């Protein structure tokens, strides 16, 4: 092998994929050729860096946790949507019961009735979002205590 071939074979040499006679030839050349020795050194350094960059495959348990995490989040989100919707409907129903007298009064103009309904709907939504926020924060606090 000439100098150029030795250089090209350095990756195979490092990987130990050369035949014993080729290996011996490389050893002899490397002993006598400084530039090839430096090349070998560089290659080993670079390979070491690549080795560090390579991310290990995540263990299966991690993936299981990841997927169940996504599933829990979706489930919780759906739960919140149903809860919010139901709570808003119930609150709105209760509110309209309260103002039934006003709503059925023919002397009250329709615009005012709509205004009352909008206030009721808005209140119901705000109330539910406040409840949700409270529950969310309390849940997080509990979680933090558990972690400590
Ligand atoms: Zn050389």
Image (cartoon, rainbow, N blue to C red):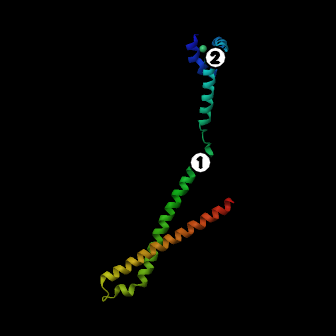
Query: On the image, which quarter does residue 136 sit in?
Result: bottom right
Tell whether circle 1 marks a residue whose Cβ is less than 8 angstroms from ligand 1: no
Q: Which residue is mark 1?
A: 64
- Residue 75 appears left or right of 51: left
* Quadrant location, the C terminus: bottom right
How crowded pointer 2 is (Cα within 10 Å; few <14, some 14-19, many 20+) is rated as few
Element at label 2: helix
Q: Is residue 132 above or below residue 49?
A: below
Which residue is at a point 42% across and 74% down the rendered structure image?
A: 122
The residue identified by callout 2 is 34
Residue farthest to the right, as pictured: 148
Residue 19: x and y, percent?
Answer: 63, 14
Q: Against 77, is 125 above or below?
A: below
Identify which residue, 16 or 67, lies in the foreground: 16
Compare residues 1 and 22 and report the one nearer the observer.
1
- Distance from disc 2 to disc 1, alpha carbons, whole Å, reads 52 Å
As helix, strand or loop, the secondary structure at mark 1 comes to helix
Q: Position of residue 46 (x, y in %)?
A: 60, 29
Query: In this picture, is 40 found above or below 20?
Result: below
Q: Residue at x 49, y 61 (%)?
A: 78
- On the image, the x and y values in percent for residue 49 come to 61, 32
**Residue 137: which quarter of the image?**
bottom right
Using the image, determine if residue 37 lies above or below residue 116: above
Q: Quadrant of ligand 1?
A: top right
Residue 104, image x and y in percent?
34, 86
Quadrant of the frame with the N terminus: top right
Question: Which residue appears at 43% of the width and 80% of the height?
Answer: 95
**Residue 87 in the figure: left or right of residue 46:** left
């Amino acid at each position: 092998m000439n100098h150029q071939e030795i250089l090209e074979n350095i990756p195979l040499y490092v990987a130990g994929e050369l035949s014993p006679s080729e290996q011996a030839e490389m050893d002899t050349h490397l002993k006598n050729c400084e530039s090839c020795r430096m090349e070998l050194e560089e290659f080993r350094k670079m390979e070491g860096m690549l080795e560090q960059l390579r991310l290990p495959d995540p263990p299966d348990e991690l993936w299981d946790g990841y997927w169940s995490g996504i599933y829990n989040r979706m489930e919780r989100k759906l739960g919140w949507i149903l809860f919010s919707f139901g709570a808003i409907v119930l609150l709105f129903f209760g509110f309209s019961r309260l103002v039934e007298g006003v709503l059925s009064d023919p002397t009250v103009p329709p615009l005012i009735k709509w205004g009352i309904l909008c206030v009721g709907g808005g209140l119901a939504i705000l109330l539910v979002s406040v409840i949700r926020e409270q529950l969310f924060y309390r849940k997080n606090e509990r979680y933090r205590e558990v972690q400590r």
